[in-house]
Amino acid sequence: MNAPWQHHTVLLREAVDALWDEADGPQPDGIYVDATFGRGGHSRLILSKLGPGARLIALDRDPEAIAHATQGPDAITDPRFQIVHAPFSSWGEVLRELGCTQVQGILMDIGVSSPQIDNPERGFSFRFDAPLDMRMDTTQGMSAADFLAQASVDEIADVIRNYGEERFAGPIARAIVARREEGHPLQTTGELQALVARCVKTREFGQDPATRTFQALRIQVNRELGELEDALDAALQMLAPGGRLAVISFHSLEDRIVKTFIARHSKEEVDRRVPFAQPRPLMLDAVARIKPSDEEISVNPRSRSAVLRVAERTAVPWSPEAVAAASPLAKKAGAKAASRAPARPAGKSAGKPAGGKGGRK
């Protein structure tokens, strides 16, 4: 029997400290956003540092996270806090619906959380033989089992190859469809793990052969890379001048998108074909790239792959023309496979309606 993993918020102090410049003072005011609440580690520390006139608005697509924030002994009752049931990609839309046009800081802690991994019924981990679900929002959308029961060999292979960077994506996809055509579609994490183990001919030290495939399916089911790009684009529109963007990612696909986004809007690009063209206005300043300390990794080995990237909004106004095309990386899996990802849910507030300072929970 696997013991539950104790939850540790990754890069807790580093991420929160990155949300404002020390020159802003010890208790900044304004509106801040925790776009991925999880179990609230970042939100609680942010609240401890904010001034009395500040607001913190959190989002999470997982109903269990919303319940954790609003019910029971760990509920957050601070009147400056409000949480909304919505995917982090919709944070800009949610804020506008709450009457906010600018924010001073936005934090995103991307990917699956330890409580999700450690709950067998969620189907994120092959440590347990459980239903093959993998949805972060269990109230809607297509599960991993549903996707594998409907997708073609090419669609499955595209997802596993591009989102899992798995060399054996083709054999795995063919085996999944062959099993399905025999009348035995995959239903559990254990069945998928065993199938992948038979298809992967080489082994990486310390890594289960199913790791990449599970990552790929989780990204597909939850539209994670597209969610990330949408959330980053909203930062350009919603951050006030001097406002901070802080993003924690856990694998190379996510980090590449964040790195490319910050570079695209913070580094001057010179078109040699037009040597006298005016430089384009830059909307971000890159601030920092931070990795977990050796001490944090020793306490929480899951933090080893985390990367925190921080950028600051310049005073250049947002305009559609200033926003570059979306990263091709997030669109790499075929359009047919991407179309099977769940639709974005409408934001549902778990707090009180926005209004005066006393009207938020």
Image (spheres, helix red, strand yellow):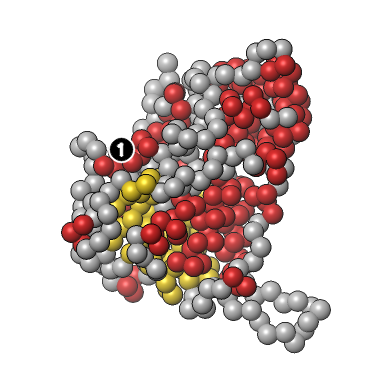
* Quarter of the image with the N terminus in it: top left
Q: Residue furthest bottom?
A: 276
* Foreground of the two, 139 or 276: 139
Quadrant of residue 275 within the rendered picture: bottom right
226 displayed left or right of 176: left
* Foreground of the two, 316 or 140: 140
Give the image location of residue 58, x and y in percent: 35, 52
* Foreground of the two, 155 or 98: 98
Q: Which three-letter amino acid code belongs to the residue tagged 1?
A: Ala
Secondary element at tag 1: helix
276 displayed left or right of 308: right
Instruction: Kindly identify the residue that appears in the image at 27 percent across and 49 percent down.
Output: 351
| Residue at image mark 1 | 67
Q: Residue furthest right?
A: 273
Give the image location of residue 136, x and y in percent: 47, 37
Give the image location of residue 124, x and y in percent: 51, 29
- Tell how many labels: 1
Instruction: Kindly identify the residue that appears in the image at 40 percent across and 62 percent down.
Output: 96
129 displayed left or right of 171: left
Is 350 above or below relative to 49?
Answer: above
Q: Would you call the spot at circle 1 few (<14 residues within 10 Å), some (14-19), or many (20 or more)?
A: some
Give the image location of residue 320, x and y in percent: 59, 70
Instruction: Kindly identify the residue that appears in the image at 59 percent across and 59 percent down.
Output: 259
Instruction: Kindly identify the residue that appears in the image at 21 percent across and 62 percent down.
Output: 357
* Residue 58 visible in the snapshot: yes
Quadrant of residue 100 within the rendered picture: bottom left
Q: Residue furthest left?
A: 358
